[in-house]
Amino acid sequence: MSSKESEQEIDLRIARIKNELAEAEARLKNEIAEILARLKKELAEVEAPLKKELAKAELQRGYIRAAARQKEILKGLLEQKPRA
């Protein structure tokens, strides 16, 4: 076997290894993309009901604040009312 043939074999092996690495990288990128897509979907499924609950809580907090303001107004009016 001449050194020329040996060089060609080495070059061929290097090319095969590079190809295998490229294929492995492509598979990993695909797997990562699938995992990310699944996680995003799961997050959306969990996030939607939580956002709905948060909106309800914000609304209730608004009602509580309004009731507290009304209570203070009524308290002030009662304190101003002349006593008979």
Image: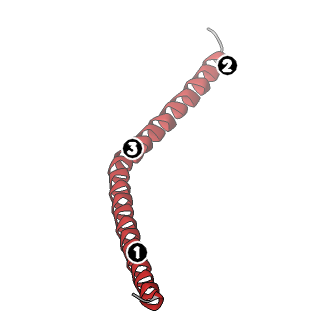
Residue name at image x 44 percent, y 78 percent = 14
Q: Which residue is mark 1?
A: 17
Q: Name the residue furthest front.
A: 1
Tell me the mark number nearer the camera, choosing from 2 and 3. Answer: 3
Residue 27, quarter of picture: bottom left
- Disc 1 versus disc 2: distance between alpha carbons? 90 Å
Q: Residues within 10 Å of mark 2 (few under 14, many from 20)?
A: few
Asked if residue 37 lies left or right of residue 14, the reply is left
First along the sequence among labels 3 and 1: 1
Comparing labels 3 and 1, the label whose residue is closer to the camera: 1
Check the image and report above or below for 80 versus 34. above
Residue 82 position (above or below residue 34): above
Three-letter code, disc 1: Ile
Q: Nearer the viewer, residue 2 or 59?
A: 2
Q: Are marks 3 and 1 in contact (CB under 8 Å)?
A: no
Q: Which mark is residue 80?
A: 2
Residue 53: x percent and y percent? 39, 41
Give amino acid for label 3. Leu
Q: Quadrant of the N terminus?
A: bottom left
- Tell me whether circle 1 and circle 2 mark residues in contact (CB < 8 Å): no
Q: Earlier in the sequence, mark 1 or mark 2?
A: 1
Q: Residue at x 41, y 69 (%)?
A: 25
Quadrant containing the C terminus in the rendered view: top right
Q: In the image, what residue type sits under mark 2? A: Gln
Q: Which mark is residue 50?
A: 3
Q: What numbered label is drawn on residue 81?
A: none
On screen, 42 above or below 72?
below
